[in-house]
Amino acid sequence: MGYQVSSASRQVSKIKEDRSGVRHYSIDLTKEIKKTELLRDVETVFHVAAKAGVDGKYSDYYRANYIATKNILSACKISGVKNFIYTSSPSVVFNGEPIKNGKESLPYVDNTISPYSHTKALAEKEVLQSNCNLNFRTVSLRPHLIWGQGDPHLLPKVIARHKTGDLKIVGDGKNNVDLTHIDNVTHAHLLAMEALFRRHHSPNGSCLSQGNGKTLCLLHCLKIAAPPEYDSLRVDKRRRTLRIKD
């Protein structure tokens, strides 16, 4: 595409510069970013870092998701970055009820039951409020349940629980879900960047939900992913769990 790319992460990368010419930097976003020269001559920042999960202390999520986002937004403004693309989550508007054909205008989550959802919502608000049209354009993308090659979180954990019979399900197990492949998520981020460069019909200051465009029955997917154990599974509606027969 002809772009010069740099990446930043908390841990020091073993690869200082890969074959594609990408430079890697180590930085803790939860602390004030004083070395703003890292963003010198940078036009677009993709903020994809986050602490995801369902357990742990709220304060850890708050620092990693909200404070880190505020810090990088501040550094971007000081350094003259033009475009800021934030990787958010549909969970920022999840209030306990299934979402079908949901709109971006749904109200933000209003409780701290899920530290991840609440702190991601706070961060998204900060990103959108930081939008300044021509000087600093921001957009938030909400891909749903990202999966793909190299995924250490979502499907590997679900499949592992499925194999041991410890996977909890909701209802009769026929629930549909929209999983978003990493290639599609990447493509959406690139499209957002290109759109922000346009002066007309730019999505700056807005949030956009993303899916694969087709829902799937998760249990059917698991049947394909782990067929040996699936044949001996039964749905225990009372306990809402999957168990393997002896």
Image (cartoon, helix red, strand yellow):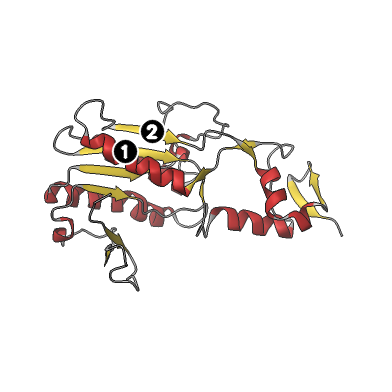
Answer with the quarter of the image where residue 96 lies.
top right
- 10 Å neighbourhood of mark 1: few (<14), some, or many (≥20)? many
| Circle 1 residue | 192
Q: Most extreme residue toward the right, as rendered?
A: 246
Instruction: Report, in whole angstroms, how far the alpha carbon at label 2 lies from the one at label 1.
Output: 10 Å
- 10 Å neighbourhood of mark 2: few (<14), some, or many (≥20)? some
Placement of 37 over or under 99, stated as above or below = below
Of residues 23 and 37, which is closer to you in this image? 23
Kindly identify the residue that appears in the image at 83 percent across and 53 percent down: 232
How many marks the image carries: the answer is: 2
Numbered mark located on residue 208 in the image:
2
Is residue 130 visible in the rendered image? The answer is no
Please state the horizontal and vertical placement of residue 226, each as a whole percent of the image: 71, 55
Q: Is residue 230 left or right of residue 100?
A: right
Placement of 6 over or under 170, stated as above or below = below
Q: Amino acid at mark 2?
A: Leu
Kindly identify the residue that appears in the image at 17 percent across and 34 percent down: 132
Q: Is residue 120 left or right of residue 241?
A: left
